[in-house]
Image (cartoon, coloured by chain):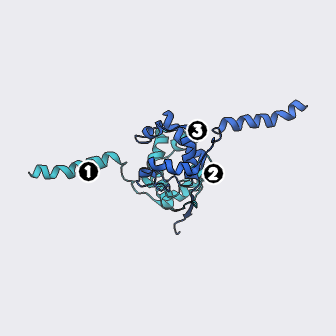
Chain colours: A blue, B cyan
Amino acid sequence: MIGRLLMVPLLAGIVTAAALPSPATAADAAAGKTKAKKCRNCHGIDGIAKIPIAPHIAGESAIYLQVQMKAFRSGKRTHEIMSVVAKDLSDEDIADLAAWYSSIKFKVEMPAE
Amino acid sequence: MIGRLLMVPLLAGIVTAAALPSPATAADAAAGKTKAKKCRNCHGIDGIAKIPIAPHIAGESAIYLQVQMKAFRSGKRTHEIMSVVAKDLSDEDIADLAAWYSSIKFKVEMPAE
């Protein structure tokens, strides 16, 4: 009976661990802002894209940003610029950059009907 | 001499045509807003993501959004949800959805130093 009661939270823990990247170790948004110099020509230091083919990344979740940077680094996602830039990023760089860009607040304004 | 003068704009035209997707034909933001019902659970009708693994897409450029939807549709970019959703999108759907989400205005507020 105890075994059965324990199983649900244990399984839930395994699913969570499998679905999400490992938590950012020592993510440092201030360091990320400095490291964002290599991102600024396309995404801006403020996360607002400077060119139409690049996305705005201000306020994206840290998880999303980390997953994408790691996908570019591993080759799962490809782009002529990002595949090159991401190759040189360490896990710490990725955590810091994600911490910086995710810390920027954004607001949207819906078009008039 | 005339040949030489003509060459620069002609080449510029070719480069532009090669670098950018063909212009959206009959992109209709209002139709896109209606079609965005299939996107809303993850990205919101307003382009603000409802789950951390999905990106906010409000205010992204129409070009960026079209390129990504087409990449998911062709298999160049993969994601367990988007690869399925994009498979059923026509070029017109993609143009309309991109027109809708790109029409939402996006402002950022930088974190205090």
Judging by the rendered image, the residue that carries numbered circle 1 is B13
Circle 3 sits in a helix, a strand or a loop, which is it? loop
- Circle 3 marks a residue in which chain? B
- Circle 2 marks a residue in which chain? B
Judging by the rendered image, the residue that carries numbered circle 3 is B80
Residues at discs 1 and 3 both on one chain: yes
Residues at discs 3 and 2 both on one chain: yes
Q: Is residue A60 among what the camera can see?
A: no
Q: Looking at the image, is mark 2 or mark 1 earlier in the sequence?
A: 1
Number of on-image labels = 3
Q: Looking at the image, is mark 1 or mark 3 earlier in the sequence?
A: 1
Asked whether the residues under the numbered discs 1 and 3 touch, taking CB atoms below 8 Å apart as contact, a structural biologist would say: no
Q: Distance between the residues labelled 1 and 3?
A: 37 Å
Neighbours of disc 3 within 10 Å: few (<14), some (14-19), many (20+): few
Q: Looking at the image, is mark 3 or mark 2 earlier in the sequence?
A: 2
Circle 1 sits in a helix, a strand or a loop, which is it? helix
Residue B41 circle label: 2
Residues at discs 2 and 1 both on one chain: yes
Q: In the picture, which quadrant includes the C terminus of chain B?
A: bottom right
Which residue is outermost to the right?
Answer: A1
Q: Which residue is drawn at 30% across and 48% down?
A: B17
Asked whether the residues under the numbered discs 3 and 2 touch, taking CB atoms below 8 Å apart as contact, a structural biologist would say: no
Q: Which residue is drawn at 84% across and 34% down?
A: A6
Q: Residue at x 58, y 41 (%)?
A: B81
Q: How far apart are marks 3 and 2 (CA)?
A: 15 Å
- Tell me the amino acid under the disc marked 2: Asn
A66 lies left or right of B26: right
